[in-house]
Image (tube, rainbow, N blue to C red):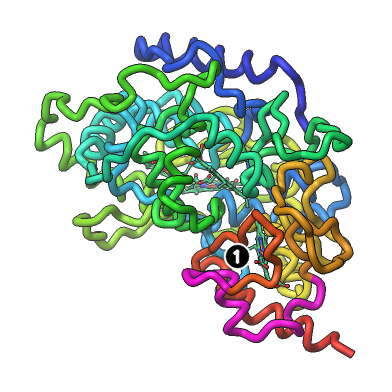
Amino acid sequence: MPDQTGWNRLVRSSVALVLASVSAFIPRYSSAHPLQAEPVNHPLVIGFERFYAGSDDETYLSEGGFLLLEELNCVSCHQPPPDLASRLSALPATRLDGVASRLSPIEIELFVRNPRFVKRDTTMPSLFAGPDRDLHEVAALSAWLKTLTADIPHRPVGDIQLGRALFHRIGCVACHAPEVGYRPPELPEEVAIEPVALPNVPVDLADYYDLDTLTDFILRPTEYRPSSRMPDFGLSEQDAIHLAAYLRSGPDLVLPQNLTEALSHDAPPADQSLIEEGKQLFFRKNCHTCHEPPRGLSSPVVSVAIPALTALNPDSETGCFSARPIGGLVPFYGLVPAQKQAISAALRHLDTLRALDAPAEMDHLMKRLNCYACHERGGSGGPEFAREAYFGYKEDPVGATTLPAHLPPSLDGVGARLDEKTLAEFLFGPTPVPSSRPHLVVPMPHYTRPVAGQFLKFFPAVDRASAP
Ligand code: HEC
Ligand code: HEC
Ligand code: HEC
Ligand code: HEC
């Protein structure tokens, strides 16, 4: 995995250069937030990075390819055959409602033009990076997106140091990078802090979102992003306020000035016909294949002539496999060779997917949703050793488990242990299950039913079949 120090700053400063040259955009910070420690320069799918990126076994790699076909939403345009439709499901992208209340007009324009300008590791491909890009179309889409505002409650500004402590205590570091050099104060002296090695989910957009939206997002992440990749921790408003202050602070851990007026909503109103054109383009450019149409936009009957999944040539060097953006309707992902190799293997081995049994399907879903960031099951996954320091605990851990007692429990045999109702409460909330582990600080975060509902079927099916 890429773990080069200095690389981040390099990438970010070159992004900043591109941004500056594109639009005289002035980056909000001259250098990054302390958490922006580990950049990648390709669409980041965390389960792929952890479990597949290093492999060159074609059959094993094809499983990683299935993950990419779903997480990169290839299957939302390239239709899978009917018998695989339930096994290859697309990822519902960020809701665009209210986008103008969290990104500034210039950031919206940059995101549409090439999302990688704003978020280097994003899984959203660019539809306008190619040489034949139509900047008028970018302007029309942006003009329309800029009208999508929302009423976000204005909340007090939180305490950066409290947010910092929370971030390193309640489970955020299972997926996101810890701040280099930070030591949780309650950690026993003999516990050493070591650098983490597994890939991290970057938090780039925290730099861009306005403080109130960032707070609101942390409180209700799955409403903004129905993918549930960022699960809902059921935080109190106070905790969310502190976390947002920490995440929104600059490299010196101070909040930028004028934070509360960060977004100017008083831009001159765009021409109505341009806005109308943007609405049409949302469908014509296939944005709707990944994004649910924002409220008030009804979906016209659109027929898109895109080759089906089984018609794709695994060895293609063109279309979405092209090394350079093509433009028009062909999205540009900037895939790295390992990702391309895995997707090609998946396209060649669609039959393997047909043959997956329930345990394998469940393992696949746990990789997709990154449950393995917190849980070990069947010898797979679990928090990496260097991250264990960031799972806070209360005094006097009770109940011996096979893992250090402050970590989330192993999921071995859980489907035989818990009934369906309890399982559903753990997975979807909203009422917290009375905890049998009062020494834990990290909660079980909540997912959405459309995304994680299959666990209700898988856990009992797999564990009761194998129970003695
Ligand atoms: C927004 C819709 C969309 C998404 C999402 C999408 N594609 Fe495509 N893809 C297209 C279009 C349009 C073409 C061009 C088809 C043509 O030229 O007839 C294409 C072409 C291709 C081709 C070349 C066709 C061939 O067989 O030579 C491949 C390979 C491909 N896509 C793979 C992928 C993969 C892999 C992903 C996910 C990483 C993906 N696509 C995501 C729309 C999409
Ligand atoms: C199970 C893994 C996981 C855990 C645990 C987790 N996150 Fe996330 N988080 C993600 C993923 C994945 C994304 C990116 C989602 C996407 O691409 O839409 C994300 C995105 C974010 C973002 C938006 C940044 C961006 O660039 O898109 C913020 C802010 C954030 N997380 C904060 C937190 C906080 C605060 C906590 C702890 C309360 C936390 N996360 C715990 C997985 C996690
Ligand atoms: C292949 C799927 C896909 C297609 C096609 C797609 N998007 Fe996205 N889009 C995403 C994903 C995934 C995200 C979340 C990215 C992230 O946070 O890294 C996103 C995020 C965004 C955001 C940022 C929202 C926010 O609040 O963070 C905007 C704006 C956006 N898309 C606009 C568009 C427009 C306009 C189009 C059509 C030109 C489009 N998208 C096409 C997948 C897609
Ligand atoms: C941020 C870490 C974290 C992530 C990510 C996470 N969990 Fe959990 N999970 C926990 C914690 C902590 C508990 C224990 C909660 C308690 O007992 O109060 C738990 C409990 C559970 C339980 C009940 C176990 C038992 O023996 O009581 C199940 C089932 C479960 N999680 C499934 C999942 C699945 C499936 C995913 C992925 C979709 C997932 N978890 C993601 C932290 C996490």
Q: Is 460 above or below relative to 160? A: below
Residue at the (78%, 82%) spot, across then down: 463
State whether residue 12 appears in this view.
yes
Name the spot of residue 171 as percent of width and height, x first.
Answer: 65, 49
Q: Quadrant of the C terminus?
A: bottom right
| Image-based side of 118 in relation to 418, left or right | left
Is the residue marked 1 within 8 Å of ligand 1, measured from its CB? no
Q: Dot 1, crowdedness within 10 Å: few (<14), some or many (≥20)?
A: many
Residue situated in front as seen by the camera: 137 or 423:
423
Q: Quadrant of residue 138?
A: top left
Q: Is 353 above or below relative to 439? A: below
Name the spot of residue 337 as percent of width and height, x first.
Answer: 73, 36
Residue at the (41%, 54%) spot, across then down: 289
| Image-based side of 20 in relation to 299, left or right | right
Q: Which residues are magenta?
A: 412-433
Q: Quadrant of residue 461?
A: bottom right
Name the spot of residue 356 as percent of width and height, x first.
Answer: 76, 73
Residue situated in front as seen by the camera: 208 or 13:
208
Residue 371 lies in the magenta-colored region: no
Residue 429 lies in the magenta-colored region: yes
Q: What's the residue type where badge 1 is placed? A: Leu
| Image-based side of 248 in relation to 154, left or right | right
Q: Quadrant of the N terminus?
A: top right
State whether residue 59 appears in this view.
no
Residue at the (59%, 40%) spot, across then down: 167
Name the spot of residue 275 as percent of width and height, x first.
Answer: 17, 38
Q: Which image quadrant shows ligand 3? A: top left
Taking the view exactly as shown, the residue that stands out farthest to the front is 396
Q: Which residue is mark 1?
A: 88
The image shows a total of numbered marks equal to 1
Residue situated in front as seen by the camera: 398 or 51:
398
